[in-house]
Amino acid sequence: MPFAFHGVGTIYYGRRQNESDGSFVTTKWAIFIFMPSVPLGSYRLWPLSGKTFSLIGVVGRYQARRLDLKWHQVVTTDLVWWGSAVALSVLYLNYWAAPIGH
């Protein structure tokens, strides 16, 4: 089961291949400051109760079964997280960090 403290640890990110029984495929990541760094494996999760997904990853109680790593999900998650970080950095550097008067 993933565990993170102050944005460092492991977490499930992503949700694909939803089934009628409520299960879905996700990827477990090693994270640093909530950013996915290393994919540790893909899993099919079956929710047991409560909320199962939020903006910061999969949360709640669930039963998990390990699968082969789903590279399409890994690449998609990387592109979304790291692409967003680069875009925000570029916006910051071009607009908010520019000297006044330029």
Image: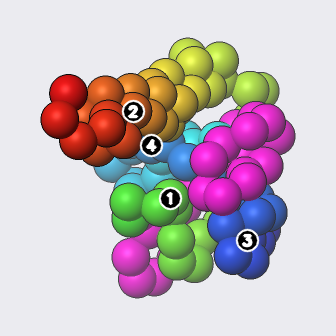
Q: Earlier in the sequence, mark 2 or mark 4?
A: 4
In the depicted structure, whether residue 39 falls above or below residue 64: above
The residue that disc 4 covers is: 15
Q: Quarter of the image containing the C terminus?
A: top left
The residue that disc 1 covers is: 57
Query: Where does the image place residue 10, in percent across and percent down from the top left?
Result: 76, 59
Give the class, few, some or many, for how many residues have Cα within 10 Å of label 4's Cα (few <14, many ≥20).
some
Question: Could you tell me which residue is drawn at 76 percent across and 71 percent down?
Answer: 3
Determine whether, in the image, residue 74 is placed left or right of residue 31: left
Q: Secondary structure at mark 4?
A: strand
Q: Earlier in the sequence, mark 4 or mark 3?
A: 3
Magenta range is 28-53
The amino acid on which the numbered mark 2 sits, given as a three-letter code, is Leu
Determine whether, in the image, residue 88 is placed left or right of residue 73: left
Question: Could you tell me which residue is drawn at 38 percent across and 64 percent down?
Answer: 54
Q: Quarter of the image containing the N terminus?
A: bottom right
Q: CA distance from mark 3 to mark 1?
A: 11 Å
Give the class, few, some or many, for how many residues have Cα within 10 Å of label 1's Cα (few <14, many ≥20).
some
Residue 4 can be seen, yes or no: yes
The amino acid on which the numbered mark 4 sits, given as a three-letter code, is Arg
Q: Earlier in the sequence, mark 3 or mark 2?
A: 3
**Nearer mark to the viewer, of 2 and 1:** 2
Q: Quick check: marks 3 and 1 in contact, CB under 8 Å?
A: no
**Nearer mark to the viewer, of 2 and 4:** 2
**Nearer mark to the viewer, of 4 and 1:** 1
Give the class, few, some or many, for how many residues have Cα within 10 Å of label 3's Cα (few <14, many ≥20).
some
